[in-house]
Image (cartoon, rainbow, N blue to C red):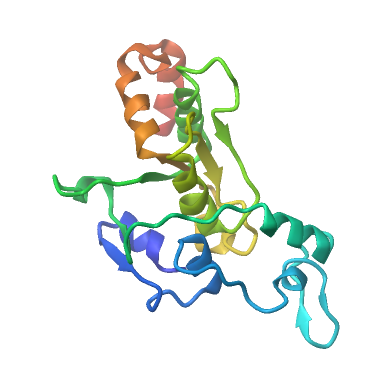
Amino acid sequence: MRSYPPKVRAGESLVFNSESLKCGGAKRYLGFTDRMRPNFEYFLSCGIENVMEGERYIRTPALVEKLMKNQKKLNIRGKYIIFKRWDKLDENDNPDVVIFFAAPDILSGLFTLANYDQSEPNSTFTPFGAGCGSIVYFPYIEKDSKRPRAVIGMFDVSARPCVPAGLLTFSVPMVKFTQMISYMDESFLITDSWKKVQKRII
C-alpha cells in the first residue's frame, strides 16, 4: 500500500483486492481477512528473542491480545476497494469514506467543521492502529454508528515514511461529510478568523 496515496492524490484511480495487497495488515484493516501473522502479539510488542524483532508499539503481548480482541470485524460488501480522487468521482460512485491528507491549518478547519452540529466535543477521534486502519478501518466502522465520527490518523510510526512530514489524515464517513459540507456557508468558514488562517494556507 506504500505507493497508493501519491498516485491517487495525483489523479490515478486504483483498485485493490486481497491478491493485489501484499501487506498482511492492510488485508486485515481493509476487510479482506481476519487473520493476523503468527505471533502478532509479540511482533507489535517486545518481539521474541532470536526469532523476531518487536515493533514495541504496545508494552506487552497480553495488551496486544486484548487490543485485538476488542476490534470489530469489517462488514465489506464487495471484493474490491477503490480509491479515487474527489474530482474523479462520477454519478455511479457511492463512496463510503472521504480521506484528506492535510497540513495542520487545513486539519483545524476540518476538525472544527466536524464538530459544528455537535454538543458533545469528541466528534473526531484518534484511535491507535496501523496507517491503513486510520484511513479505512475506523472511519468505515463509524459510518454505521448512530453518531458517526471522523478519524485523525497516520500516526503509525511505521507508516509515517509513506506520507510527507507535514501531513496527517482526516478520514470521515461520507454520511457525516455530507452533513459537514451542508453547514459550510453558515459556519466559521465565513468568518474573519478563518480568513486569517486561509491566507496562510493559500
Query: In the shown orientation, is residue 175 left or right of residue 93?
Result: right
Query: In the shown orientation, is residue 67 left or right of residue 17?
Result: right
Decide which of 5, 90 is in the foreground and name it. 90
Where is residue 47 drawn, in percent x and y?
80, 75
Q: Is residue 47 above or below residue 178?
A: below
Where is residue 59 drawn, in percent x and y?
83, 59
Where is residue 32 drawn, in percent x and y?
44, 67
- The answer, for residue 39, to whether it is visible in the render is yes
Residue plotted at (50% across, 34% down) = 149
Decide which of 168, 175 is in the foreground and name it. 175
Q: Which of the 4 quarters of the picture holds residue 189?
A: top left
Q: Which of the 4 quarters of the picture holds residue 61?
A: bottom right
Residue plotted at (62% across, 55% down) = 129
Decide which of 31, 182 is in the foreground and name it. 31
Where is residue 202 drawn, in percent x and y?
37, 33
Q: Residue furthest left?
A: 91
